[in-house]
Image: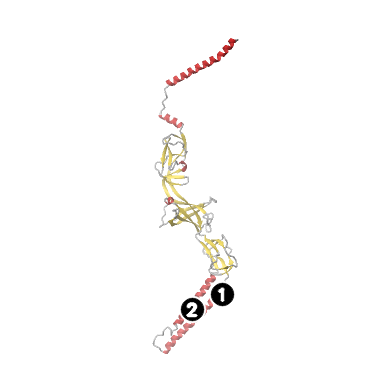
Amino acid sequence: MSKMKSILRIIPAILILAIGIWGWKHFSTAVDESKTKKPVKLSKAERKARALENAQQTHVIELISEDFLVELTSHGIVKPPAITTLNPQVSGIVAKISPNFENGSFVEKGEILVELEPSDFQSQISSASAALARAEASLAQEKARAAQALRNWQDIGFDDEPNALVLRKPQLKEAEANVAAQQASLERAQRNLARTKIRAPYDGRIRSRNIGLGQSVGSSTKLGELYATAYAEVRLPLSTRQLGKIDIDEIEFEHIPVVLEDALHAYDDRQWPAKIVRIEGELDPNSRELFVVARIEDPFGRKSETSGHPLRMNQPVTATIQANTLNNVVAISRKAIYGKDEIILIKDNTIHRQTINIVWSTIDTVFTDTEGLDKALLATSKLSYASQGSPVRIIEEVPHT
C-alpha cells in the first residue's frame, strides 16, 4: 500500500518533466528553422501595394478650371428718395380732410389732402378785385387828362414840345403803378385761396397725419408727412477688397445690376431687382468704405408687377452685386484648405502638398489661379498625417459639380 502511494506521487513529476523536454525541443527546432530560412524579397509594386494596405484613405475630387462671375455682398436699409413735411402756407381752420390722408395710404401727385375754410380768402379776392377796378378807372381818367392836356397845349399855339408835367406823365405813371399793385394784390389773394387746399407734391405714401377737423393751423403747423413711392434707394458699403473686383467708371457711369433679398430672412423666397445709379464721392472716414446707391423702381408694385412683393421702408436687405469675371480659376471648398493657403493633391497615390494663390473667396469657397491644378485630384477628406510623399488610398472619386 505504501508502494502504491509512492508511485502516485512520482507520476505528476514525471509528466511535468516530459512536457518540459518536449517544449524545449520544439522551440529549439523553430529557432533553428527561422535562422536557416531566407527572407522573401518583394518587388517594388508588391511593396507599394503592401504600403497602400495600411495607408490613410481619402475621397478626392477632380479640379476643373472655369470662368467665375464675382458677386459682391453688401447690406443696407431701404429708404425713400424724399420725405416731405406738409405745412400750410396760409392760416385757417381745417374744414375737410381727405380719406386718403391716413397713415400708410397711397396718394397721387396733386391730390387734395386738406382743405381750409375758404370764406376769408374769397372775401380778400372780392376786395382786391374792387380795388383793381378803381385803379383801372383812375388810370383811364389820367389817360384822358393827359390827352386833353396835349390838345390844350396845341390849341394855345406853343411851338415848343410840352414837358412831362404838362402831359401829366407823373400822374399817369402813378395810376399805372397803382393798377399793377392792385393786380398783384388780386393774384396774391387768388393764390392764398388756392393754398387753402393742401395737395400732395408727388406720388407718395402717407407716413403720418397730425391734424384733425376744426383745428386752427398756421404756417408752422405740421399737418403730416409723406414719402415718395416712385422708387426707393439703398446705400451699400463696399470695402477696399470688394472695390478691387468691380470696375466703376465714375465719369461715364453705367448702371450695375443688383439683386436684393430680405436680410431678416422673414421672406427667403423674395427678391427685388435693382441697379446702382450713383456712387458717393468720398470714403467713409471710419470704415474707409465707399458707398454706392442702388435704386429699386416702383418698390410697392403700384405701376408694375415685376417685383412680385412690395418692399418696406427701413427694411434691411442683403445686396448681391455683379462684379468682374475671373478667367480660368479653380474653385476649392474651404473644408479642403489646410492652414492659410495649402491644399493636398493626390498623385500616384501619394500626398503632394500645394500652396495656392487665393484671388477671391466666399463663405464656403476659395478661388485660385495657380497653374497646374486643372484635372488634378484634390483630397477632400481631412488627413491626420499628411506629410509630403506619404502613401494614401483613394476611396472614391467624387464627380465635379
Residue 395 in sight from this viewpoint: no
Amino acid type for the residue under numbered disc 2: Asn
- Whether residue 237 appears in this view of the structure is yes
Q: In the image, what residue occupies the spot 59% across and 12% down?
A: 5
Camera-nearest residue between 287 and 401: 287
Relative image position of residue 241 (x, y in whole percent): 43, 50
Q: Secondary structure at mark 2?
A: helix
Asked whether 400 or 184 is in front, the reply is: 184
In the picture of the structure, the residue carrying the numbered disc 1 is 123
In the image, residue 63 sits, relative to residue 151, either above or below, namely: above
Q: Nearer the viewer, residue 238 or 345?
A: 238
Question: Circle 2 sits on which residue?
Answer: 178
Could you say which quadrant of the image residue 358 lies in?
Answer: top left
Q: Looking at the rendering, which quadrant does residue 7 occupy? A: top right
Where does the image place residue 157, in percent across and percent down from the top left?
41, 89
Query: First in sequence: mark 2 or mark 1?
Result: 1
Q: Where residue 285 sits in the image (x, y, percent)? A: 44, 55
Q: CA distance from mark 2 to mark 1?
A: 20 Å
Tell me the quadrant of the picture where the N terminus can be found.
top right
* Quadrant assignment, res 213: bottom right
Number of residues whose C-alpha sits closer than 10 Å to that of mark 1, classed few (under 14), some (14–19) or many (20 or more) = few
Q: Position of residue 333 (x, y in %)?
A: 46, 43
The furthest residue to the front: 2
Q: Residue at x 47, y 79 (%)?
A: 176
Residue type (three-letter) at the residue carrying disc 1? Ser
* Pick the front one: 246 or 10: 10
